[in-house]
Image: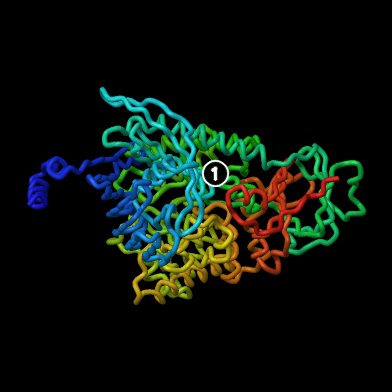
Amino acid sequence: MTYFRCCSAALLGMLCLPLAAETGVTERRMDWLTQGERSGGLVVRIHPDGRRDSSFEFNDRGRGPKQEERITLDADGLIVSLQLSGKAYMGSPLDEHFQRDADGSASWRSTAETGESSDADGAFYVASDGTPEQSAILARALLASADQRLPLLPSGEARIEALHTQSVTHADQSREVTLYAISGLGFSPSYVWLDEERELFALAYGWMGMTPEGWGEVLPALQARQTEISEAHHRQLAQRLTHRLGPDWCIGPVRLLDIDAGLLREAIAVRVSAGRISAVGSVDAIACDGIQTIDGANRVLMPGLWDMHAHVSISDGLRNVAAGVVAVRDLANDHDRLMAVRAQMAAGEVIGTDVHVSGFIDQRSPFAAPTGRLAENLDEAIEMAGWYAERGYPHIKIYSSITPDWVQPLAEAIHGHGMTLSGHIPSGMTAERAVVDGFDEIQHINMVFLNFLAKPEHDTRTPVRFTLVAEEAGSLDLESTAVREFIALLRERGTVVDPTVTIFDSMFRHRSGSIDPNYAMIADHLPPTIRRSLLSGSIDIPDDQVERYAASADALLAMIKLLHDAGVPLVAGTDALAGFTLQRELELYGQAGIPAAEVLRLATIGAAKVVGAEAEMGRIAPGYRAEMILLDGDPLADLAALRRVTLTLRGDRYYRPAELHQAIGVRPFVATEAVVVQ
């Protein structure tokens, strides 16, 4: 009867509060915030027996989770049973169950995996997916444990540390909230804010976050404090893991990858002075006596790699450097946060790369990107371009909600400031028209396919920009006149294409229940919870569509090869997991049929040329910055050698990737060995 009364009240638009009063259930409501605006929420219903039922959803440009969760706990706050249903962020279905029995045995199953344990007592089950309430449940269980650490199911261990307590106020209410760091779930600590009752109070994720209903005004201050603490953590890592060289040093003997010629030069030494290469030649010809010399052990020395599609965070730097990435291009970020992280990385205060910045402009709409200020009209968009120009940005990226008729005048304004223009192709616009109207670069290979597949009824601001390509790309005739003419236009205009193909290859091929094929080769090196996340597919691939989606993934690679063969400039970007994804992106270009030497060229000097840094970075030659990586293997013979970086050299600093990986719970890809510095 209570259920029907509640439903009737809801139909009349009434707030259903009697349910809690009549049954003893307490209810906690939280807002999910995107740039300070409510875009979803979490409702947690706490039953007298401690059971917690949670409903969670939010909308992010037509994407977002929608989940129902039921969790029962024991006296120690450990999960006894869990049921989760709904959909994940990109729409893949969720159906997860966990049960721990009185004898200490446990079993679990989900769309991603099944498992069991005969000795689960004292362990905390980490679900494959789920609502944010799970973070608070884990935090409370850790705080209640004897040494504030717990073994995890299916594997791993978590630890918790209280970092900071502060007061927050809203209207006439005041709360004491504490920030906790949970380690063991990922590469970096996970942060969660709990209130005085150790209930979930806030999560802060930059552009997004969560607070109790109506308390959104306190999130920026909590985010700022959390950022300070995160930065301190990464400064400590840098102090421990950065190795210093003097103003003059050498490395040799090495096999030097001549990036222009696409071949290896044997028995080479490289001398560096004040962070720049002063001499390159045979070991007998380069004067290294009396200065620090790194024993290159005849390994391959090559220019450092570039990731041309990143969204920089302070935690990305270590993974990038461990992967041999020395420079990234940021393609949408908060200006103040980006400038702060960029400066810290440049100074070596935190481990990181060169950061080349891009401005970002989108038009206000229900599907606008969650990146701060949005243009209400063309004049505002042009004004935003000027704002970025005044601050030294060389490039602007625009997004899917921009009105197509804005592109030409906006491009003229951007070019007038000496900047270049790239982006998503706005919904309702063809890529061909975007190029004619002034695009210098296209982000994402799916945008190339939408030029031929999207019809007026397709709103590509939504996930249709993924699903349409997944369904139809494999049937596109890549030898057709339309495709050939479009490629010719790109070549004629010198339009750059940034494929980020790894994310689409995973999206179109990976089904829940097996390791994502694009990360299978590294999965066993990753922390247990990260490895486990690779079992979950991002979109729902129906049984009868597996071959069709795979054919579309093949078509993306074939298109990349056509673009390359036609002379269309390509850059290697990821828009995904820092470091590891770039290595896979380059491997996929090789699988597409692009020779390894050309793949390596586009990821080094080719990228530097696109951002105007080709006189300083991208090759190993006198006058160039000493941004180099030492490999245990020959990438010309096998691009997989890019995963075996033994040293990353950045001016007067060097890093041992094995050490970096160990610091974040990754099993190294090369042996940990001393670098001989004489």
Tell me residue 618's x, y (percent): 68, 51
User: Taking 246 as reference, is 445 above or below it?
Assistant: below
- Position of the C terminus, as image quadrant, is top right
Rate crowding at label 1 as few (under 14), some (14 to 19) or many (20 or more) other CA atoms within 10 Å: many
Residue at x-position 67% and y-position 51%:
657
Residue at x-position 49% and y-position 53%:
575
Tell me residue 249's x, y (percent): 82, 43
Three-letter amino acid code of the residue under disc 1:
Ser
Tell me residue 326's x, y (percent): 64, 48
Task: Indicate left or right for 235 with 287 as reference.
Answer: left
Provide the residue designation for mark 1. 315
Residue at x-position 38% and y-position 31%:
177
Tell me residue 456's x, y (percent): 29, 61
Query: Most extreme residue toward the front, as rendered?
Result: 103
Residue 378 can be seen in this image? no
Which coloring applies here?
Answer: rainbow
Nearer-the-camera pick, 627 or 175: 175
Residue 498 can be seen in this image? yes
Nearer-the-camera pick, 162 or 67: 162
